Image (cartoon, rainbow, N blue to C red):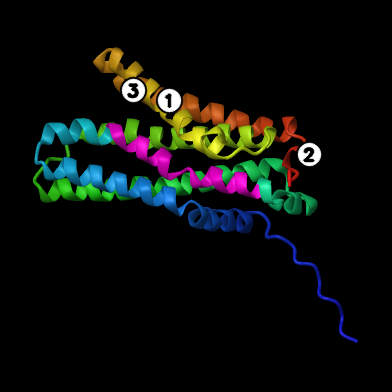
Amino acid sequence: MAAPDSPVHPPSGARLTATTIRRTIVIGRLYLGIGGAMTLLLSLILASKGSATAFQTTYPLELPLFAVLGSIGGLMTFTSDRTKGVFEYLISYGVRPRTLFFNGLASTAAMSSIVLGVGLVAGLGTAVVRGIPITPDLEKSLALYTIPVCYAAALFTAMIGMVWAAISTPRSGMNSPVGLAPMVGIAPTLFILLLAETAPTSEYYYVTGGGALVIIVATVGLLAMSGRLMGRERFLSPL
């Protein structure tokens, strides 16, 4: 007599994170495509105009906005899994709630990296072809504002959205965490930019880098507290 099939256990650790990232790319492909396309379009337009001043000033400031938009797939996957009972299945096999949040952040970072990579390759590549110099100031803007703010804003958006999704009943459209999350992500990006613009020129990058660091620390703090403050019942499917 044939033995019954053994139960299928979910992947654990790094395999679960990698699986979540792959699923996020599929689920959030629309947002990823929109964010990547807008980043590509902005980069090509600014670089193709041939104005070095316009490119060097505008290009590094607007990339974070599109990175936040393109990374919404991480939050979409988290919300979808909670609604459909995937988290119940994972938790029943010993996956901790904090791991679920961590995988959401890892997926968000991966999506942001794709959008950011598209923008950097397209923008800087076109600038070189058009003869726009890649100045030290532009490099500093990308390193101390664009890149850190891209990740900080995207991760903060995802963390706030995931906590909101875990403690609330499911809603659709603009009233849902996914619908309102881009506004949450844009807010700290604009705040850091406005704060940096009002600061002395010599302190500009201290403000941008420090602001991004504060947002990342807040995100890590929320991740650390999620395991203690969120009971497992928060991840039960409402269906």
Left or right: where does residue 131 sit relative to residue 160? left
Q: Residues within 10 Å of mark 3 (few under 14, many from 20)?
A: some
Viewer-side residue, 107 vs 209: 107
| Res 233 label | 2
Location of residue 51 in the rendering, given as x and y in whole percent from the top left corner: 10, 36
Instruction: Determine whether label 2 and label 1 are within 8 Å by CB.
Output: no
Q: Amino acid at mark 1?
A: Ala
Q: Is residue 173 left or right of residue 4?
A: left
For marks 2 and 3 on the same chain, the one whose residue lies earlier in the sequence: 3
Tell me the residue that label 1 is attached to. 187
- Three-letter code for the amino acid on which mark 2 is drawn: Glu
Circle 3 is placed at which residue position? Answer: 193
Task: Give amino acid for label 3.
Answer: Leu
Write the start and end of the magenta stretch as one range: 61-81
Examine the rendered structure and indicate whether residue 179 appears above or below residue 125: above
Secondary structure of the residue carrying tag 1 is helix
What is the distance, in whole Å, between disc 3 and disc 1 at their CAs?
A: 10 Å
Q: Is residue 137 visible?
A: no
State the predominant SS element of the stretch in magenta: helix
Work out whether mark 2 precedes mark 1 in sequence or the reverse, and give the earlier one: 1
Observer-nearest residue: 79 or 99? Answer: 79
How far separated are the C-alphas under marks 2 and 1?
31 Å
